[in-house]
Amino acid sequence: MKMDLSRLHDENVSSIVFNGQIQKDEIDIDGRRIRFIEPIKHKGEIYKADEDYLINLDIKYKYEEICGRCLEPFVREERAFLSGKLVKKTDDIMEDEEGEIIYYTDEKLDLTEEIITMVYLSLPMKPLCKEDCKGICPQCGANLNVQECNCIAEDIDPRFAVLKDLWFRE
Ligand SMILES: [Zn+2]
Ligand SMILES: [Zn+2]
């Protein structure tokens, strides 16, 4: 996806509005596999502020992932935002510009990489189908969100188990 910035040279143009989508199948992050079930959508605006071009972008994506607790796939929709200053890439680039800088060349702006990065950063820390996912029973493997099982939770500390035996002997 490339955007033509040359329109902004026109004095009568103070901003350009745009939208688009990026086709991306999946990304792998630290062993997590994020599968996009529709193109990553974005819409935003580039506007002039004194000598600079500023950008604001709203990103929306829908993906499928495997829950880390119950191991079932789930689908979620998330949003991300990208904003910053557009700086034309030249040979004498100042590396210590403040704030979020997005470089472009030849009046063409390609935000694909930035958008994917924002998606990456906006993903929830843990892959969970829901906040209170009960997970699977470690003994019988039942998905505890769907059914309860009859396994008895043997989560007694072995040191106390000895005490329990003593108590019940009397
Ligand atoms: Zn789950
Ligand atoms: Zn069980």
Image (tube, helix red, strand yellow):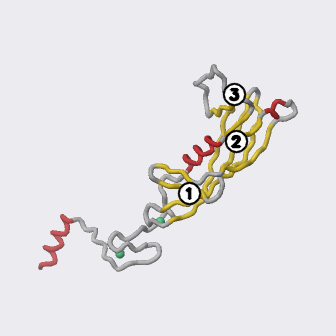
Identify the amino acid type marked 1.
Answer: Arg
Q: Which residue is mark 1?
A: 35
Mark 2 nearby-residue class (10 Å; few <14, some 14–19, many ≥20): some
Mark with earlier residue (2, 1): 1
Secondary structure under badge 1? Answer: strand
| Image side of residue 78 versus residue 54, left or right | left
Asked if marks 2 and 1 touch (Cβ < 8 Å), the reply is no
Kindly report the distance in space between the C-alpha atoms of the residues bearing marks 3 and 2.
Answer: 17 Å
Label 3 sits on residue: 88
Which numbered marker is on residue 115? none
Q: Indicate whether 133 appears above or below 21.
A: below
Where 11 sits versus 125, above or below? above
User: What's the residue at 15%, 69% (across, down)?
Assistant: 162
Q: Secondary structure at mark 3?
A: strand
- Tell me the residue at 44%/66% (across/down): 70
Mark identifier at residue 56: 2
* Quadrant into which the N terminus falls: top right
Residue 123: % across, % down: 54, 51
- Residue 93 image offset from top left, x and y in percent: 62, 22
Picture quarter with the C terminus: bottom left
Q: As shown in the figure, which amino acid type bears the numbered disc 3?
A: Lys
Rendered view: 144 above or below 94: below
